[in-house]
Amino acid sequence: MKRFVPILAILAAMAAAIVCESAGAQAAAAAKRRPRLAILDFDYATVQSYSSALFGTNVDVGKGITNLLVTNLVKDGTYSIIERSALDKVLAEQNFSNSNRADPTSAAKIGKLLGVDAIVVGAITEFGNETQKKNFGGGGGNWGGFGIGGIGHSKSNANVAIDARIVNIDTAEILGVAEGKGTSSRSSTSLLGGGGNWHGWGGGNADFGSSDFQNTIIGEATKNAVDALTKDMIADAPKVAVRTITIDGLVAAVDGGQIVLNVGKKAGVNVGDQLEVVRVTKEIKDPSTGAVIRRLTTSVGIVKATDVDDASAVCTPVSGSGFQAGDHVKEVSQ
């Protein structure tokens, strides 16, 4: 009996060490994971009449500028940016209107559904050669009137200004504010001058990332403004807390190239998440109680969630093969 007590003490210590190790690993994984953002298309109501006059049609300059910002942030790597397709799907399901683009409360609801750490809303406050008020929903200033691609008879520099807010998805609190202002180094009688025959605004959309657009006067100012906004947002990264979500589920079925999990949105799985699939090779049990104190596993591979509902997720393989029903899944820190 005297020998039995020390053995129990040793086993208890081992179990405690395993729990501590697991908790420590989870904390370390959360610390390493980059803040995950979703970025809504910027509101451009303040400058819509001016941009329409410039392009000769209503171009969604908010979407064009947002795409530039996403490209910058992905290249930098400070944040993890949610895929556009996942964002568009949730916006369509929620019947999200363009009038809500700059509303932090509406954005926070979308952010919760996406499972991001924060969501970004913004507005274009200046787009042309006249100064507009620097706030959401503001207006003012005179455009002066011009035809397609023109600004009158006088030469002018192009100016672009953007505001962005980083929003807490749980409270709708503003975590950080970023600004970007850009002016072209050149002046011209046409804001679309300098870019050859650029006319990439078919169907109300514009490819602001094209070299032809960025060679125009307004394109140069736009790029400068987005670059400045990017720097501000990167500086605000420490203000965005990484939310700790532990995902622990099972592979429910494997059908061809699709792996179906028994966990979904309610467990914290979102479209675009990558999960590690592991297989239990042996269970170590406490000899005195029979309780499992350790499961030895081997990695099967990595899967990516492509379709998620409340209780399940459909994934495709990223690496590995031989996935089976009953395999365990856990989150992979990115």
Image: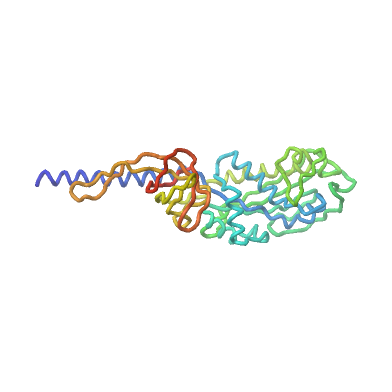
How many numbered circles are shown?
0
State left or right for residue 1 relative to residue 281: left
Along the line of sight, the residue nearer the viewer: 17 or 251: 251
Along the line of sight, the residue nearer the viewer: 207 or 69: 207
Q: Is residue 322 above or below residue 163?
A: above
The spot of residue 309 in percent (x, y) is 50, 57
Q: Quadrant of residue 207?
A: top right
Which residue occupies the extreme right position in the image?
Answer: 153
The spot of residue 103 in percent (x, y) is 63, 60
* Residue visible at 47% across and 51% down in the picture: 243
State left or right for residue 309 relative to residue 279: right
Along the line of sight, the residue nearer the viewer: 212 or 174: 212
The spot of residue 195 in percent (x, y) is 80, 39
Q: Is residue 246 visible?
A: no
Which residue occupies the extreme front position in the image?
Answer: 256
State left or right for residue 85 relative to residue 198: left
* Residue visible at 65% across and 57% down in the picture: 101
The spot of residue 281 in percent (x, y) is 31, 41
* Residue visible at 20% across and 51% down in the picture: 289
